[in-house]
């Protein structure tokens, strides 16, 4: 019995086989390219709609917060200094000025930034990179912003934002009446949000660069 050899095939069959193989190869390459383009579009959306704006927002918030504290390590120490001056008859006005300075900062700078951050998070939850764990962190942040809303609303109701309050009390210098909860979990949450957003943003930037290189290598644009 004679052995079969590919040369015995009609040239038409060989041509069809080569054509099918070429088509399958091109189809697979096209699908891989399209997949990378889709991934790139998604990463671009994550960067432009969620992590980019949120990263810039939190950086602006952090820097302005540090400036508002005038060299104090944290808000609690700033408020303690304000209260100490307020209690001293010789520096009462300075204590009131410090407290009023903080409240103006929160009302005009920090609170609007926090509201914008909340809006960014709510509107782009579908772009979360890390799922449930990330959602829980953002939930804690939104809870804090809601607490902050109540503080600001209370100031507005009592006319205390611009320092128009004539008589101050000890409780006016507590963190709870000036920025929200002061427990350790809340403090940690602030740092975690900044760290998480920064790291995720940087990771997505690198992923974007990698996808762009892969698309270019495969002849895409």
Image: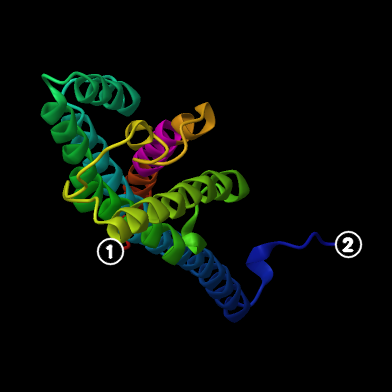
Instruction: Find the distance from the CA under tag 2 to the CA under tag 1.
Output: 55 Å
Image point (49%, 61%), residue name: 125
Image point (50%, 67%), residue name: 31
Give the extent of the magenta segment: 190-203
Image point (32%, 61%), residue name: 157
Report which residue position mark 1 lands on: 221
Location of residue 52 in the rendering, given as x and y in whole percent from the top left corner: 30, 51
Which of the image's four quarters has the N terminus? bottom right
Marked residue nearer the N-terminal end (2 or 1): 2
Q: Nearer the viewer, residue 52 or 38?
A: 52
Location of residue 54 in the rendering, given as x and y in whole percent from the top left corner: 33, 50
Which of the image's four quarters has the C terminus? bottom left
Q: From this viewpoint, is residue 200 visible?
A: yes
Location of residue 122 in the rendering, given as x and y in whole percent from the top left corner: 45, 62
Q: Quadrant of residue 90?
A: top left
Q: Secondary structure at mark 2?
A: loop
Q: Quadrant of residue 12?
A: bottom right
Q: Nearer the viewer, residue 221 or 54?
A: 54
Task: Characterize the local packing of mark 2: few (<14), some (14-19) or many (20 or more) Cα atoms within 10 angstroms.
Answer: few
Q: Secondary structure at mark 1?
A: loop
Does the segment drawn in magenta span residue 193?
yes
Q: Is residue 148 left or right of residue 163?
A: right
Report which residue position mark 2 lands on: 1
């Amino acid at each position: 019995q004679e052995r079969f050899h590919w040369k015995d095939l009609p040239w038409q069959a060989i041509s069809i086989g080569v054509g099918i193989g070429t088509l399958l190869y091109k189809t697979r390459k096209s699908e891989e390219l399209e997949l990378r383009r889709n991934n790139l579009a998604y990463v671009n959306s994550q960067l432009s709609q969620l992590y980019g704006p949120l990263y810039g927002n939190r950086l602006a918030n952090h820097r302005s917060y540090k400036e508002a504290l005038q060299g104090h390590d944290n808000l609690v120490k700033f408020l303690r200094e304000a209260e100490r001056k307020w209690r001293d008859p010789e520096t009462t006005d300075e204590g009131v000025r410090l407290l009023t300075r903080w409240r103006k900062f929160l009302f005009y700078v920090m609170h609007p930034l926090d509201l914008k951050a909340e809006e960014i998070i709510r509107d782009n939850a579908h772009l979360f990179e890390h799922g449930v764990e990330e959602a829980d962190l953002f939930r804690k942040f939104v809870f804090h912003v809601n607490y902050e809303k109540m503080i600001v609303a209370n100031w507005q109701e009592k006319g205390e934002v611009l320092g128009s309050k004539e008589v101050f009390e000890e409780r006016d210098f507590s963190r709870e009446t000036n920025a929200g909860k002061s427990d350790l979990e809340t403090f940690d949450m602030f740092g975690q949000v900044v760290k998480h957003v920064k790291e995720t943003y940087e990771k997505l930037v690198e992923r974007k660069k990698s996808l762009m290189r892969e698309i270019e290598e495969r002849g895409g644009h």
